[in-house]
Every structure is written in structure tokens, then in C-alpha cells.
Image (spheres, rainbow, N blue to C red):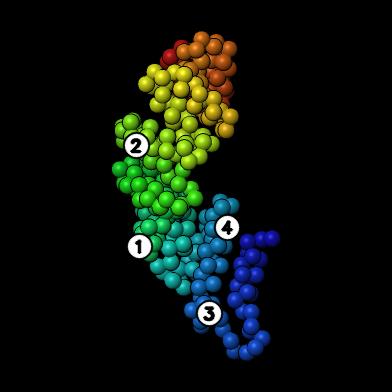
Amino acid sequence: MSLRFALVLLLAGLCSGCVLSGDYNPMKTSKGRDEARQAYVQLGIGYLQQGMTERAKVPLKKALELDSSDADANAALALVFQAELESELADEHFRKALSARPQDARILNNYGSFLYEQARYKDAYERFEQAAADTLYPERSRVFENLGMTAAKLGQRDLARQQLEKALRLNRQQPRALLEMAELSYEDRHYVPARDYYERFSLLSEQNARSLLLGVRLAHVFEDRDKAASYGLQLKRLYPGTPEYQQYLSEQ
């Protein structure tokens, strides 16, 4: 079913009972406008999830025409602008969303992720902390993962480790947290825990440039030449233009 057809069905639902009165207009009622706004937001999110950001703007604009302060519409539009690298507009709409719902953990976490992407690590950490305060948020493990990643960027290694450990207590299957813990453990020369974290990461995720470089380093520590050569070959084949590959070459 197409997204456009889905909207037609959603909006058609607003007119249930229209047959009772020929001049009935659901958009003149508060309930009808709320349902229409929600339908527009869902359509916009559907387009966004398919990577169709330009189309997503159309229903989201209509939702904001019905209520310019709507948190969900502003939060979705912020993600649209983030995807389009319109950072000022994304920031503006995240702030509008939080003005309407300042304690919404999902919006706080998304805003924190945007700020992290902008290298605004101190601001990002504050937003993640606010999100983590919601103990019933179903994605709380992701928030602690984000806190750990951000603390590492701020150079607070002990704090980063504490937050990542919290994340993994809530959900042991988080590849980003496992890789970060493997990296921190390796840098602290705690090689056995580093290898354990790395192996758990490898079971859950495909390799990337960063993980392959760490794999080479750990293989050298444990004198596994075949594994070191295999990781090095993958790094050369898949990520030849990356800083990780240049670092790998300099270490050989």
C-alpha cells in the first residue's frame, strides 16, 4: 500500500459519520483536526523512513499548519532537515519540539544525536542525561550508549566506561557499545577484556574500518598472524582511503 493511499485512508476515517449530515466537516472539530494532524505526521515519518525527505516536508508542513507547536511534527521535521544537512533548521525544529514536550526522552535522545553529529559534545551530553532520567524509556540502553560515546569524545574515559557498562547491563547486544569498550580496554592495555568485547561485537555486527584496525592490533597482541593478515586485507580491500587504513600501514 502506498504512503499516499495510506493517508487517504487515514483522512477518510475522519469522515466516519459524514453520511449523517451533508454539511459535516470533521476539520471544524478539535478531534478532527488532531486526527488529521496525526495522520499527516505519520505520513511524513513514512516518507522520511524511505529517505524521501522532500516528500516528507509536504504532510509535515500541513501538520504544522494545524498546530505550529506540535512536538511530533517539529521533531520529525528536525530529522528531515538533519538528513538534508540543514543544521540550523534542524536545531530550530528540535528546540520547538522540546518547547512543547521538554521531558520527551525520544526527542531529547534524537536531539542529542544531532548535537553529537555536529561535534557539540557538551550540549549533546546534557541532552542525553535528560533523556536517561526517564527510567521507563524503552530505548534507555541506547541513551547510555550515547552518553558513553559522548563522554569518550570529551576525554572523560572513566565516565565513558561507566556509561557504556550501564548500557550493556540494560542490553548486552549493542555493537557500538561493545566496540567502544573494546577500544577503551585495548588503550588501557586490558587485552583479555578487549578481546572479549571485540568478539562479542563481531558476532553482532559487520566490520567497519575502525573495528578492523582494532582487530589487527588485538591479533598482533595475541600473536595470531593469520587473523591479523585477514583483517589487514579486509581493511585494504574495503576501506583503502580511510584514516584507519593509513594508520594500519604506518603500524606495519
Q: Amino acid at mark 4?
A: Gly
User: Which residue is denoted by mark 1 in the rendering?
Assistant: 99
Q: Position of residue 230 (x, y in %)?
A: 58, 17
User: Which residue is denoted by mark 2 in the rendering?
Assistant: 151
Q: Amino acid at mark 3?
A: Met
| Mark sitting earlier along the chain (4/1) | 4
User: Which residue is denoted by mark 4 in the rendering?
Assistant: 46
Nearer to me, 88 or 106: 106
Task: Give the number of the mark in front: 2 or 3.
Answer: 2
Q: Position of residue 119 (x, y in %)?
A: 35, 41
| Mark sitting earlier along the chain (1/3) | 3
Q: Is residue 72 above or below residue 161?
A: below
| Mark sitting earlier along the chain (2/3) | 3
Distance from label 4 to label 3 (Cα)?
A: 23 Å
Residue at 49%, 26% in the rendered image = 197
Task: Give the number of the mark in front: 4 or 1.
Answer: 1
Q: Is residue 74 above or below residue 18?
A: above
Residue 48 can be seen in this image? yes
Residue at 56%, 84% in the rendered image = 25
